[in-house]
Structure formats: structure tokens, C-alpha cells
Image: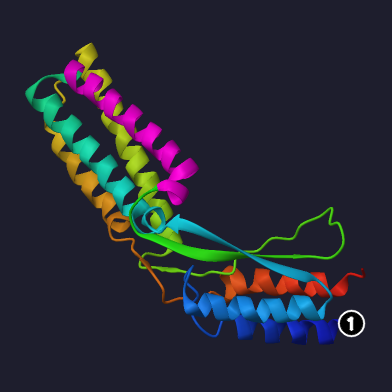
Amino acid sequence: MPDDSLVQRANELTRALSRKPRFAGSADESEARGLCIKELERAGLECVEHSFGYSQWPGKWGIPSAAAAQLATILIVSRMAIRMGPLIALLVGAGLYIALILASGDERRRWVQVFPFLRSSSVNLEARRGQPKVWLVAHLDSKSQTVPMLIRIVSSIALGLVTLAATALLLVSLIGFVDTRAFWLAIQVAAVAAAIPSLFCLVRNESPGAVDNATGVASVLLAAASLSS
């Protein structure tokens, strides 16, 4: 296929796939998957659909929940440092952060599959020709978020920096170089300010997903069509 024809076809596929938002499990995602089936079967591939169940909760509420947990930990440690001293605050803070790390790791490994709330279902489309040695993969669904990615990254980094500052303040308090009680209010204000963007980062079904990921799907479709049997 000439380059100009390939570009035109890529443009057509991307526009067709991104006509509507395609939240996983939605009718619009199913419609876009039907378009993929037609393209792949036209290219001589055999298509099979595999349904699966999943929880929408980690995707919809993972970011604000994680930010809320980290913010709560910083505020608890701050109050304990003022009222009960740095040693108890440090021990409690260490325990809370270990729990957060373990919960975060478990969430990334399993919660999409096993979490009992906001259960939904969708379909994976598998297309093959002969005995494939290489698989091309692209996600068809799309989602939108109320806070842009760059701001979410800044919020996450800022929360991490506040956590480091709080830890350093506890260690300085333990050594006894300086009375740090006056600094804890600043730590709490900084933590709230850092967490706000992540707390309001909500997932919606309002993005047509042209770049993420209609372009990727179109690339896979064109690559599959360009290969001989």
C-alpha cells in the first residue's frame, strides 16, 4: 500500500474508532470492537471474543483514595508529633506507610480482577492467522479524567516531598536539635494543598480516545492487514 494511501486509511480508522467515548464494557466499546472484527476478518484473520469480569473501582477511585490515605497519614503523624512526641509519631507513621505500601501493591496485582465493588464485564478480542509467534496488542477502551495527567503527576510528587519533609522533621525532633512543633502546621497545609488535585481526579466516560488509544488500535489493524499469511 502506498504511503499516502496508508496514511489516509489510518486517518479513516482513527476517526471511525473515536467517534464516541468507549468506556470498558459499554455499548460504544462493543460497536468499536465490531469494526475491528470486520477489518481483521477482511485481512484473513480468525476472530474469537473472550469475555471477562472486572471491578471498575480501582480505575475510578484508586487515585483519590490513595491520595486521601496518604493525606490522612501525614495529618495523623503531624498531630501525634505535636501531642505525643516524635518517637510515637514516627512509629505510627512507619506502620501506616507500610500498610499503605502493602495495600497499593495488592491493589495493582489483584483488585481489578477480584475487588467485589463496581463489578462490570467486557470482552477481549483475539485474532490470529495460523500459529502466531508475535502478538500485537492495543486497548480499545477509553476514559477521561477531571484532572490532567501533568497536574496529577505534580500532585503525587508533591505529596511524596511533603512525606519526606515530615519524616525529616520527625528525625530532627528525635535528635533534639530544635523545637519543631511550629513547623507541623506548615506540613499539614502543604499536604492538603498537594493532595487536592488527586482528591478531585475522577474518571468519566467523556473522551473519544483518539490518541489513547484509537491510534494504537488503528496501527494494529493496519499492521495485521499488511502481513501475508
**Region in magenta:** 87-114
Tell me the quadrant of the picture where the N terminus can be found. Answer: bottom right
Q: Position of residue 37 (x, y in %)?
A: 69, 77
Tell me what residue is drawn at x 29 percent, y 24 percent. 94
Against 89, residue 208 (above or below) is: below
Against 137, residue 10 (above or below) is: below
Identify which residue, 41 or 57, lies in the foreground. 41
Q: Within 10 Å of the Cα at label 1, are there few (<14), some (14-19), or many (20+) other Cα atoms?
A: few
Quarter where residue 137 is shown = bottom right
Mark 1 is on which residue type?
A: Met
Tell me what residue is drawn at x 84 percent, y 53 percent. 133
Classify residue 192 as left or right of residue 99: left
Q: Position of residue 147 (x, y in %)?
A: 37, 64
99 is within the stretch colored magenta: yes
Classify residue 142 as left or right of residue 6: left
- One can see residue 177 in this view: no
Q: Position of residue 65 (x, y in %)?
A: 30, 49
Identify which residue, 8 or 117, lies in the foreground. 117
33 is within the stretch colored magenta: no
Quarter where residue 215 is shown = bottom right
Q: Position of residue 51 (x, y in %)?
A: 56, 62
Tell me what residue is drawn at x 12 percent, y 31 percent. 79
Classify residue 20 as left or right of residue 15: left
Q: Secondary structure at mark 1?
A: loop
Color style of the picture: rainbow
Tell me what residue is drawn at x 76 percent, y 85 percent. 9
Against 194, residue 12 (above or below) is: below
Name the chief secondary structure element in magenta. helix
The residue beneath circle 1 is 1
- Please, which residue is most extreme toward the left here? 83
Quarter where residue 60 is shown = bottom left
